[in-house]
Image (spheres, grey):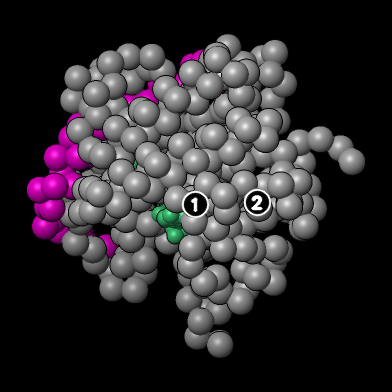
Amino acid sequence: ESQYNRFILPGGLGQLGQGLAKKLRSKYGRENVLLTDIRIPDKSIVKEGPYAYADTLNYDAIKELAVNHRADWLIHFSALLSAVGEANVPLAVKVNINGMHNVLDVANELGLKLFIPSTIGAFGTDSPRNPTPDVCIQRPKTIYGVAKVHAERMGEYYHHRFNLDFRCLRFPGIISCDTKPGGGTTDYAVEIFHKALSNGSFVCNVAPDTRLPMMQIDDCLDATIKFMETDVSKLHQRVYNINSMSFTPEELAHEIRKHIPNFEITYDVNPMLQEIANSWPDVFEDDNSRRDWEWEHKYDLSKLVEYMLEGIKKQMCIQKVA
Ligand SMILES: NC(=O)c1ccc[n+]([C@@H]2O[C@H](COP(=O)([O-])OP(=O)(O)OC[C@H]3O[C@@H](n4cnc5c(N)ncnc54)[C@H](O)[C@@H]3O)[C@@H](O)[C@H]2O)c1
Ligand SMILES: C[C@@H](O)[C@H](N)C(=O)O
C-alpha cells in the first residue's frame, strides 16, 4: 500500500474540513479520508465517506482512530476561533492548547505527518502590519493567537528534536459559500454576501476601513494539499504565510455594488472584534511560499465576489425547489 495517502481530520465538520475532505477524497479515494468531530454530521456528510466521533481532548481516542485507520497524516482542524475563544477562554485553552498537544503527541508517537493551520491571528500590535512577514515579532492579544503561536513553536520544536514532519500554513480569513464560518473576527466577510442577496443590506460589526487579509476557500484548500504534497527537500521552513488579497468592508461593499447596485452597508461596531481586527495584519507577505513550493492564488477580490454571489444564488434556488 502506498504511503502518505490516508488522512484523519479532527475537527473536520467546520468551515474548512468539509471542503478539504471532498478534495482529498476525489484525489486519494473516499475510504482514505476519515472525517472526525464531536458533533452529529448531516446525512449528506455521512454519504460522502467515513465519519467518526473523536474528541481531541482524549489522547487515546485520537490514537486508537489513527491506528485503526492506518493514517499517514493528521490534519488538525479542531479549534475555537478568535471571537468564540475570547468568549470562553478556559475552553479555548483546553481545545486549542491541550487538544493540540494530544494530536501532536499522537503524530509523534505513531510517526505520522502532521498539518496544523495557523492564522493571521498569530500576530499582534507589535508585529509589522503592512506587510507582515513569516518571521517577526508576534505577541498576539487573543487566546486564539497565543495558542496558534504555541502550536507553531511546538511543531517546529518536535520537527527539530524528533524529526516530526510538521507543516503549518498561516491562513487569512477564509471566505466560503457552502460552509459557514465558526465564530471568527473575519466572519462578516461571509455573512455580507448572504445578507446582500436576501435583504439588499448588511450591518457590519467592524469599522469601514478595517483592512484584513482574506482568501477564497478553494485557494486555501488547494494550497493545503499542494503544501502537504511538496517534497520535503523544497521546504526551508515549517511555518509559512499564504496570501491572496486584503480588503476593507467599504471596498468589499463597493465590489458587491457592481452586481447589486442598491446594496447598502451600515455599521454597528463590536468593540471586542474591532480590537482584535486592529491587532491583526493589514497585508500578509508570502514570498517564501511562492518561492519554496510555488504557491499561487487564483482568486482576487472581483473573482471572489462573483464566486460568492453565484454560489449563494444556486443554494437559494435549491432551497426553493426542495
Ligand atoms: N476559517 C478561517 O478563516 C481560518 C483562518 C485561519 C486559520 N483557520 C484554522 O483552520 C482550522 C479549521 O478552522 P474552521 O474555520 O474550519 O473552524 P470551525 O470553527 O468551522 O470548525 C472547528 C471544528 O472543531 C470542532 N471541535 C471543537 N472542539 C473540538 C474537540 N474538543 N474535539 C474535536 N473537534 C472539536 C468543532 O465542532 C468544529 O466543527 C482551525 O484550526 C482554524 O484556526 C481557519
Ligand atoms: C482569521 C481566522 O483565524 C478566523 N477566521 C478568525 O477570524 O478567527
Is residue 278 found inside the magenta-colored segment of the image? yes
Give amino acid for label 1: Asn
Q: Position of residue 156 (x, y in %)?
A: 49, 20
Quarter location, residue 153: top left
Instruction: Specify the segment rendered in magenta.
Output: 262-289
102 and 128: which is toward the camera: 102
In screen coordinates, is 249 left or right of 215? Answer: left
Q: Position of residue 212 (x, y in %)?
A: 30, 37
Confirm or reject: label 1 Cβ below 8 Å from ligand 1: no
Residue 258 sits above or below residue 207 on the image: below
Residue 58 disc label: 1
Point 32% across, 14% down: residue = 136
313 and 65: which is toward the camera: 65
In screen coordinates, is 184 left or right of 169? Answer: left
Residue 64 disc label: 2
Residue 281 sits above or below residue 175 on the image: above
Q: Position of residue 183 (x, y in %)?
A: 32, 55
Q: Earlier in the sequence, mark 1 or mark 2?
A: 1
